[in-house]
Structures are given as structure tokens and as C-alpha cells.
Image: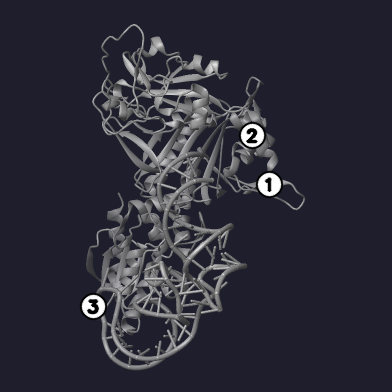
Amino acid sequence: MRWSHYFIPTLREDPADAEVVSHKLLLRAGMVRQLAAGIYSYLPLAYRVMQKIMAIIREEMNRIGGQEFLLPALNPREIWEESGRWTAMGDNMFRLRDRKGADLCLGMTHEEVFTAIARDELRSYRQLPQIWYQIQTKFRDEPRPKSGLLRVRQFIMKDSYSFDVDRAGLDRAYELHREAYCRIFDRCGLKYTVVEASSGAMGGSESSEFMVRTEAGEDMIVVCEACGYAANLEKATSRIAPIEDAPGPDAPEEFPTPGVRTIEDLTVFPGGAPADRQIKTLVYMMSAEDGPRPLLALLRGDHQLHETKLSDALGGVAVRPAHPDEIRDLLGASAGSLGGVRAKEIARARGRELRIVADLALRGRRNMTTGANRDDYHLRGVDVERDIAVDQWADLRIVNSGEGCPRCEGGTLEVFKALEVGHIFKLGTKYSESMGATVLTPEGKEVPIVMGSYGIGVERVMAAAIELHHDADGIIWPETIAPFDVIVTVTNIKDDRMREAGERLYAELRGAGFDVLLDDRDERAGVKFKDADLIGVPYRLTVGKKIADGAVEIFQRRTKRASEVRLSEAVARLRELKAQSRP
RNA sequence: CGGGGCGUGGCUCAGCCUGGUAGAGCAUUCGCUUUGGGAGCGAAGGGUCGCAGGUUCAAAUCCUGCCGCCCCGACCA
């Protein structure tokens, strides 16, 4: 490609709307332009990078026996009704109506379409296993698109689906995908962590996320450096020091606490208690068909509730914090004075059934302090198991950095932000059952196909590579996904000798199989150098004054090291450098 | 959906508070000089000031409504 006729609209300044590094650099490097919130146009440079990423994905998917499809993005309502997701997806699904008034939607993912094909065509265990995939545009009406390409409403995803006759087959397909994903992200130059993830309401049994550590990410993950334990915060547990409680009274004692509203208030209140000797009482509403049902979530005073854990503990139902008036209706007190003791009786007297879920860290604790369900009063001497009618014990607490690893003895946990670039998921029979996709076993028995679902966000891989590999001057592409292998910069295109040498290099490099960008613009050298750094091409061959001596400069973007080489040896030298940089 | 911010040439922004002929830098075009790290001088072109309504002799500026975008939160396979 010749830069003079190639569309790379670089920007000198940071665009005002961009916050995260990848967003700024994608815009400045002339790779993307925004069309609307969460909707981007990919310009030639970005699309080249994406094509390289997709080529790597294809190779690795094909290697594990994947077969590439291309399914419609436009889906009829019916198949989404079958799976139950027409309503389950709520406002996140883009919906539209055709001229006849039929409901359609834009695919957010393709379990339904692939399962429909499987149902119609797969009959026998002999046809299994299958791994089907596509690389296709997905549409999700995100409540808040943000951070450039990191959270968008239209994006390209590689999604694959495995179809097996039994769990063992699913386990194999899952493992194949895990390995393929590791190869894909390795090859794309990403440093990542594979974490255990919540399977949530999807009903799956196991799921792993491929996370890239970056402040631009939106997920929190927990990692133990000692043993390699890694989990999404919504799934992570930790070891915390046990607390010895002094024996308390035979029954809780109520005492006045005027003005005390928070855990913190009570720690400094005379006759109060330190936070780890208090019981935090939170009221949540879980959605049910006949209206929201209240529940109490109990935690140690210094612990925080993870709502997803609460939801998971309840079997995946949606939960939300209760409103102040709902709390008062339920317990006759306001949020600062709540407690689990006699809470069910109080609620029942007010005509509500209350469920109590307590965090495991409260198990066996006694002589604790909590609200009395009466404003400005608390209870001390509470023995959790004796005094509170707990329906369910569960891990509800948010893990903090520095806590002990749940898997190994000496390890401590670190919590950090990460970006999800891939997700593999054991679906089981959720879709095959609801949509009736079955096969006959060797015994002639009809069983639902056991499925897995596996995704990779193509734009996120590209953006993550930028988040991970950049400096003050711009992007530093991993060589495997760089838009070009090498840029030939002719410092003064009006100089015949330089131009001819540049042309010669350009032709030779192309002949040798390199993706080459020839910067033949009539610009000052400084501008070309800045632009080359910005767009992040791994190597630059500079044709300047030294061409008089038959020499050109070879510059490595990552190390910023430059060396001189004979024009005739430039191609060979570049080959060497590339070979060396490959791990 | 709640909170905050922004919307003025292609880009980055000033002007708005205190109403009175729309500005700067960069970019673009032309000329001269310059030519290895975002050049200098000179000249030129380019703006429904997000949209609609209102107040006023007069609105980028004040008021109302709407739209769009960004950030925080909620939400989110």
C-alpha cells in the first residue's frame, strides 16, 4: 500500500470524547470513527488488524475441527420464544417489525439459530460430535456503551457451539476450546488470565473467562500468585482469619442507640461493637411471578455483599435492593436499625414471608451486635445460629485484596480490573431441551444434545492489544496482528534517489511476502515518523540521505532501536529481526 | 433509569457569567523559503454556534422543551 493513496486519517490531538487509551489511539491512528454511541466504523487500518485476528481465530478453530458457518443476524421472534429468551433478554435486545407486522430481532448471540439447525438436521449420535462456529456481527442494546470499542452495541464475535451426545463429549469439546483459546490469545500477543466465572442464570455447569488485566476493563478478578487460583470476583472465595467470640448472654439484649444509622456509627458509639462483631442486615427484593419477594441478606459488619453471588445463591433469580418504604413496610424500622432476630415474625405479622440468607462468615458467631428492627435500638449478645432463623447459608461476601487463597496454604489474593476477551461455557441441555434438539444414542434412546458455547470478541482483542502494547508515541502492535509488517519511510519523496530506493525496497519486500506500507507522502520527515509511531507498525525502513552511500535505517518500533543496513541487505536483515523477536 | 458534564469551521478549544457584525491554534488550498522527529512567512476558502420554540429593537450568549455525545452509578451470558 502507498500511504499517499491509502486512507489513514491520523489525528494530532486526543479527541475530546475518548477516555481510555485504546479508544484514543484507535481514533488518533485513523482506525475507527464513531457513528453513534457504541457504534463504530472500522477504517482500513483497523479492518486489516481485525482480519489478522480473525485469520488466527479461524486457523485455531479449524484445527480443533470447527466448521465455519455464517448465520443470519436478523432472526424471527419464534426461535427466541422457544428458548425463552425473547422475554429474558429484555431491553438488551434490538427488536424490529417487518412490513407484515412480524416481530424480528437482531441476534445478540446464536444459540437459537445453531440449535434450530441442529434440531432439524442431527438425528444420531453417529453425527456427533460437531463444532460449529461463525465470525459475525452481534447486536446488543447496551444500557451504557463506553470506552471506545470495549463496550459497544454492535460488534464482531467469533461464536462457536459444540454438540455432543453426553457430558463426557462436552468436557472434551470444552477442553479443546480452552486450548484453542489459549493459542489464539497467545498468538495475538495478549497476556491473559483464565478465571472461573459464574454460570449465573444460564444454567450451565462450568464456565471460564479469558481476562486481560487492564484498568480499562470492567470486571474484577481475583488471582493467587502462589498457586494460580483465579476467579471472577462474582465467583471468588477467600480464606479469612477465624474469630473467637467470648460467650454472650443467654438471650439478645436490646439497648438504645440514638442516632446510630451505620455500621461505622456503631463502632464508635459507647457500648457499640467493632465492625467484625456486627451483623450487617440488607433487605433485597427477588423477582417472582407474583411480584417481588423480600429477603434478608446477612453479612459480617465489615464485609460487603456481592449481588451476583446473592442471585446465584438463590438459583439465578434477579434481585435488587429494597426501597426505603418497602423496608419500613416489611420490618417497621428503617435501614439503619435492621436485624435478623425475630425478623420473620415481624414480617409475618405484617403479612409478608421473609427469607433469610446469611454469609458463611457468620456461621458459629455469637455475642454479635445488630439492629433491633426498632429505630434507634440495637441488640447485643446475638448468637447467629441460636437467635436468627437462617434459611440458607451461602458465600455472599466480596473478596478483598490481601485475603488468604482458598486453594493453597500460604497464598494471598490480589484483586484487579480486567477485560473479558473470551468466554467458554458448558451450556448442557438448556437449549436442546427447550428447542427439542435430540439424537438417538447407540442404545436407541432419544436424548437432548449436550451443548457448549464459546465466544471471542474480535474488537476487544484488538483494543486489548492496544491497552497492553502502547507508549507515549502510539500503538506498538504485536507483530502477528499488526496492520503491516513494515513501513518504508522515504524522508523526502521529491528526491529521486530516495524515491527510487523506496520503490525498490517496497517491491522487494512485497516480493518477499511482507505486508508493506510505503510512506510516499510529500510530507516532512518528522510528520512521517510521528505517524509511523502512532499507527504502530513493528518495523520501519527509513530511506534518507544515507542512501547516497547505499544505506538505509532499520528501526524497531517496540525497542526504538535503529541500525544501519545496506539497501541490498535490508530484506534479509528484516527477516532476521522478525525471526529473533518471535518467542 | 438516577447523577454530572459537554454540544461553536474537519480536529482541539476560546467567546456565554454581564445580549450588540463569530474568534484562535492545528488541518485544507495557493505562493515563497525549509526538508531526519508533528516547519516559517504571506494569502485564501470554510461555521444553520445541536434542533425547536420563547423573551428582546437585537440571542452563540437569557428562558423552556427536545435531541445527541461523554463520565459516574444502576444495569449487563
Label 2 and label 3 in one chain: yes
Residue at the (32%, 54%) spot, across then down: A469
Q: Quadrant of residue A407?
A: top left
Chain label for disc 2: A
Q: Amino acid at mark 1?
A: Leu
Please tell me which of labels 2 and 3 falls first in the chain: 2
Q: Quadrant of residue B30?
A: bottom left
Inter-mark Cα distance, 3 to 1 = 64 Å
- Tell whether label 1 touches label 3 (CB within 8 Å): no
- Tell whether label 2 touches label 1 (CB within 8 Å): no
Tell me the crowding category of disc 3: few under 14, some 14 to 19, or many 20 or more residues within 10 angstroms, Cα based: some
Q: Amino acid at mark 3?
A: Lys
Q: Which residue is mark 3?
A: A546
Residue at the (50%, 32%) spot, across then down: A323
Mark identifier at residue A83: 2
Q: Secondary structure at mark 3?
A: helix
Q: Secondary structure at mark 1?
A: strand
Residue at the (37%, 21%) spot, across then down: A377
In-image side of A337 versus A273 (left or right)? right
Q: Which residue is mark 1?
A: A104
Please tell me which of labels 1 and 2 falls first in the chain: 2
